[in-house]
């Protein structure tokens, strides 16, 4: 028994990254890497598994943050309802459609519509109308089925998911992002303040199941480095990704927000947080090789070229912010959010060059759907 234990301890990072099945101990060992040589072994393995499994392409989703009006009070978030220091906005239909068409003209195959969370009929119909128009206007010889659409509009009913799916008109490029934030139920309640009322972890999982039934490619994810979160929690997050059989994952470092309600709890030191976030991305890629993983903008808030580091550690999706500049500063989910001043076109050129430096190619005019989704649906 003692010998067996000793043997287990002797497994190196190089041994672990070659595996295709991972124990919780393996996962925690990968998440806790700090030594630079070990970090490079982990990075290279995740990068290679990405290109081998899902190819060399990086896919764009042009992100349009069309409203910061929110009915919820998530404590970590800078646009939560109780933050009265942020001017609220909602872009009108023409502006949103114009941003979407800009993306199509610039060869993005997909966009992502994100906003604060509202569930009233006016909002639901507004989104439906926008989706229909974007679809109609984005069909072209280069995009014969129109733009791919990812929605990131919080928890809705099954009927609403169905309504939006239909309106988007492109079932092959239909996706929804709904992070569960953490799989630790106590931590989840701590983040959302109101256990069982406003937002509940179980309810969140049900919503993800509804989205799957409604025909979406389903994406979720967590924040990394939340005060009180442990490596065991992050390991359970990865187990939850597996259990939910997700098609896509978006996750990034937790960064304190002036407008949030958690300033007093602080955040991890920047370099350690970056390391942990990259370890989490790389480990997730090794455990779930055929999914899409987005390089979160929050990586860039920590460090210039943070998202490129994400790509070097297993990400294959990037979400350039194409929100009109006038309202961007009011969609500050966390401090130091980047690209507040840049025009979309600047972001475009800059990004393409920096992605190429990672040895990967930006794939234009394609949907870039998750291989996992293709495998599970046969589509
Ligand atoms: N209202 C929608 C989408 C907007 S929030 C929803 O709740 O799904 C998008 C994501 O931003 C959240 O899921 C959360 O993980 C992330 N986020 C919010 N505040 C953050 C912070 N302080 N640091 C890092 N990420 C944050």
Image (cartoon, helix red, strand yellow):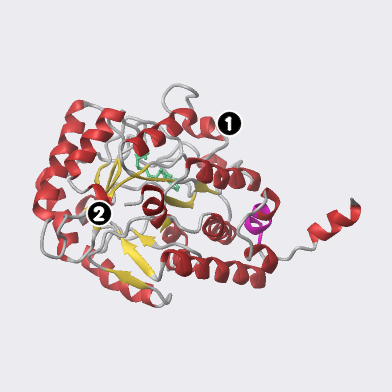
The answer to whether the beta carbon of the residue marked 1 is less than 8 Å from any atom of ligand 1 is: no
For the point 54% across and 65% down, which residue is it? 46
For the point 10% across and 46% down, which residue is it? 133
Q: Provide the residue designation for mark 2.
A: 111
Residue 64 visible, this orientation? no
Label placed on residue 376? none
Q: Provide the residue designation for mark 1.
A: 186
Q: Is residue 323 magenta?
A: no
x then y, percent, for residue 198: 41, 25
Q: CA distance from mark 1 to mark 2?
A: 34 Å
Question: Which residue is most to the front?
Answer: 378
Query: Which image quadrant is residue 215 in?
Result: top left
- In this rendering, the answer to whether 41 lies above or below 104 is below
- In this rendering, the answer to whether 152 lies above or below 191 is below
- The quarter of the image that holds ligand 1 is top left
Q: Main secondary structure of the magenta part?
A: helix
> Along the line of sight, which residue is nearer the eye, 93 or 82?
93
The answer to whether the beta carbon of the residue marked 2 is less than 8 Å from any atom of ligand 1 is: no
Q: Earlier in the sequence, mark 1 or mark 2?
A: 2
State which mark lies toward you, 1 or 2: 2
> Along the line of sight, which residue is nearer the eye, 11 or 309?
11
- In this rendering, the answer to whether 154 lies above or below 353 is above
Mark 2 Cα shell of 10 Å, populated few (<14), some (14-19), many (≥20): many
x then y, percent, for residue 282: 54, 61
Disc 1, disc 2: CB below 8 Å?
no
Please tell me whether mark 2 sits on a helix, a strand or a loop. Answer: strand
> Along the line of sight, which residue is nearer the eye, 223 or 3?
3
**Which stretch appears magenta?**
27-33
x then y, percent, for residue 261: 46, 36
For the point 43% across and 32% down, which residue is it? 204
Please tell me whether mark 1 sits on a helix, a strand or a loop. Answer: helix
x then y, percent, for residue 167: 17, 40
């Amino acid at each position: 028994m003692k010998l067996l234990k000793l043997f287990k301890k002797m497994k190196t990072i190089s041994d672990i990254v070659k595996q295709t099945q991972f124990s919780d101990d393996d996962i925690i060992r990968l998440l806790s890497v700090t030594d630079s040589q070990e970090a490079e072994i982990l990075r290279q393995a995740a990068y290679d598994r990405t290109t081998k499994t899902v190819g060399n392409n990086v896919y764009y989703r042009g992100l349009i943050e069309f409203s910061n009006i929110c009915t919820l009070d998530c404590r970590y978030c800078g646009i939560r309802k109780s933050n009265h220091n942020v001017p609220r906005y909602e872009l009108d239909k023409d502006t949103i459609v114009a941003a979407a068409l800009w993306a199509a003209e610039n060869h993005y195959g997909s966009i992502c519509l994100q906003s604060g969370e509202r569930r009233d009929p006016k909002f639901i119909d507004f989104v439906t109308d926008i989706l229909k128009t974007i679809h109609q206007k984005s069909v072209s010889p280069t995009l014969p089925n129109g733009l791919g659409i990812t929605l990131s509009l919080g928890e809705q009913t099954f009927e609403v998911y169905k309504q939006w799916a239909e309106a988007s008109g492109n079932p092959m490029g239909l996706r929804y992002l709904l992070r569960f934030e953490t799989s630790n139920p106590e931590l989840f309640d701590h983040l959302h303040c109101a256990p069982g009322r406003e937002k509940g972890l179980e309810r969140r999982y049900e919503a993800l199941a509804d989205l799957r039934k409604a025909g979406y490619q389903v994406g979720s994810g967590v924040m990394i480095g939340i005060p009180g979160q442990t490596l065991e929690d992050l390991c359970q997050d990865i187990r939850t990704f597996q259990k939910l059989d997700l098609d896509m994952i978006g996750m990034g470092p937790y960064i304190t927000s002036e407008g949030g309600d958690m300033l007093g709890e602080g955040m991890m030191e920047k370099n350690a947080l970056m390391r942990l976030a990259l370890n989490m991305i790389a480990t997730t890629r090794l455990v779930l090789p055929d999914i899409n993983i987005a390089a979160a903008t929050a990586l860039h808030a920590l460090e210039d070229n943070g998202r490129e580091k994400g790509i070097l550690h297993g990400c294959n999706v990037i979400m350039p912010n194409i929100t009109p500049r006038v309202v961007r500063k009011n969609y500050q989910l966390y401090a130091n959010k980047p690209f507040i001043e840049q025009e979309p076109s600047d972001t475009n050129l800059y990004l393409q060059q920096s992605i190429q430096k990672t040895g990967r190619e930006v794939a234009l005019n394609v949907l870039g759907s998750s291989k996992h989704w293709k495998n599970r649906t046969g589509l």
